[in-house]
Amino acid sequence: MTLPCTLGRARLFIPAHAKNLMEHNLAQTVHSFRGKRVLLIGDLILDRYVYGDAERISPEAPVPVLRAVEKRETVGGSANVAACLTALGCKVACCGAVGADDAGETLRRLLKDTGADAANVLSVPSRATTTKTRLVGLAQHRHRQQLLRLDEEDASPLAPEIIREIITRAREIVPEVDVVCIEDYDKGMVCAELVEAVLTEARRYGRKVLVDPARLTDYQRYRGADVLTPNRAELSLVARRPLDSIEAVAEAAVRLIEECSAGAVVVTLDRDGAAVVEPQGWRHIPTLPRSVYDNTGAGDAVLATLAASIAAGADLETAARLANVAGGLEVEKFGCVPITAEEMLAELRLADRAANGKVREVKDLNAELTLRRDRGETVAFTNGCFDILHAGHVDFLKRCRAQASTLVVGLNSDASVRTLNKGTERPINRFEDRAAVLSALECVDYVVRFNEADPTALIREIRPDVLIKGEDWIEKGVKGREVVEASGGRVVLLPLVEGLSTTKIVERIRGGA
């Protein structure tokens, strides 16, 4: 059942089970990515980066002088989609062509290094491998800014015999995969003959085919695709008009479905998220605001996540929600840096912390802290039993939180409390209850259990920027000090509230005071 709202020719619909959709376990879908098989067909590109210090303007022309300090080569184009898929845990078989040149050999090697299968990447004599070289200036040796991009390519159509060979190899792979992806950069490989042949074979085995289109004004070469994934600017080219509203995007996508006999269109909308458009209607999938550092590779991350999600059996709405997460993480990085399944899971936990609570296992916590550090946040750590939480604890934890943007509290397990000579009846409150009370404090971001009397092993794993204890530890020696200071962190000792301690409170209760 759907609840339609007519907007011209495009019908916005909200499924009657929308609440259940919103509560869908996105994390479980991400866990299901592992081992899913994807056939990836498309233009393979070698990305080169030249990093240098831009310290002065040339006396010959009003341009920066770049003093090269580092050079790097990495996968680009559909090869970057392959890297994104393997980072998510998928198994990828690539079909495509590179030149019979040094760049082609480098690209094939880099592709294998990502974990993708490059056995069906053909080397074509007398054809240059598409190469993009970016000159990147470093301001104060840190802040990266792309100054110029140099493209070397032959974008003419591949010879018919090469296309036929790629079709033959793709047909052999289709039965072995869960989904098929076609990534078109309009560099001469993707054509109507190739798409039609792959679609025919995919339908025979019940496989979905996703197509990420090139910047074209006519999508007829993709006719019959199950899912088309243009961004707003690309869809505007096809519609031949600006698409300034989400409703206008939906109208254009509905028309595209009709003209190309497509099953659905997922339109990425930058800061506005995505629109999932199907013949029966459309849905807007919003996204979180992001600090955009570099949008290179965001489209590749989106396509990879859509493909992995569909391979895992997710519906289009779930796939689009996860693709929003991947695209958002990608724009916060410089260059094409594949987003891992662990990063996505950490981002989902961050976004849904209120529902999931603050208690974490160490492995999950580290992934979330890495994301926070990537955004410039700092991490403070303290630990204790916190058996009966009192005003002294609250005051101490508030001051701990003031030392960094994130506070992690290491909480002794019940077994470890019993090793601390606090008495046979301690802890009075079990771990779950103590963790629940700590989690209710606004100043506490995370609670993590540790089973040892000494928290050093936990501190070594978390790597806090600031380690905090009470001043009563000044003579006992702060556990973990060496670990923190060795990695450039600092140790802070805070004064405690006079006369307040769990032991004294327990004694007062027993004494009837």
Image (cartoon, rainbow, N blue to C red):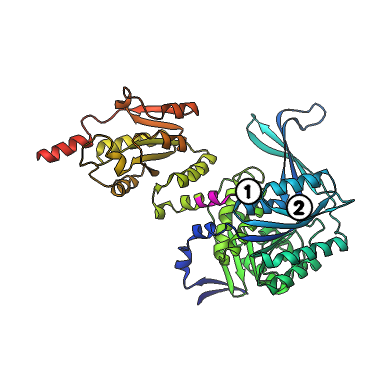
Q: Secondary structure at mark 2?
A: strand
Q: Is 150 covered by the magenta stretch? A: no
For residue 44, which numbered disc appears in the image?
A: 2
Q: Position of residue 277 (x, y in %)?
A: 61, 68
Q: Give, as a three-letter code, the residue at label 2.
A: Leu
SS majority, magenta: helix
Give above or below for 212 relative to 291.
below
In-front residue for pair 79/122: 122
Task: Name which residue lies at 15% across and 36% down.
Answer: 507
Question: Would you call the spot at circle 1 few (<14 residues within 10 Å), some (14-19), or many (20 or more)?
Answer: many
Segment tinted magenta in the rendering = 338-345
Answer yes or no: is residue 219 visible: no
What is the quadrant of residue 78 in the picture?
bottom right
Outermost right residue: 126
Q: Please give the residue where the numbered disc 1 appears in the rendered image.
A: 338
- Please tell me whether mark 1 sits on a helix, a strand or a loop: loop
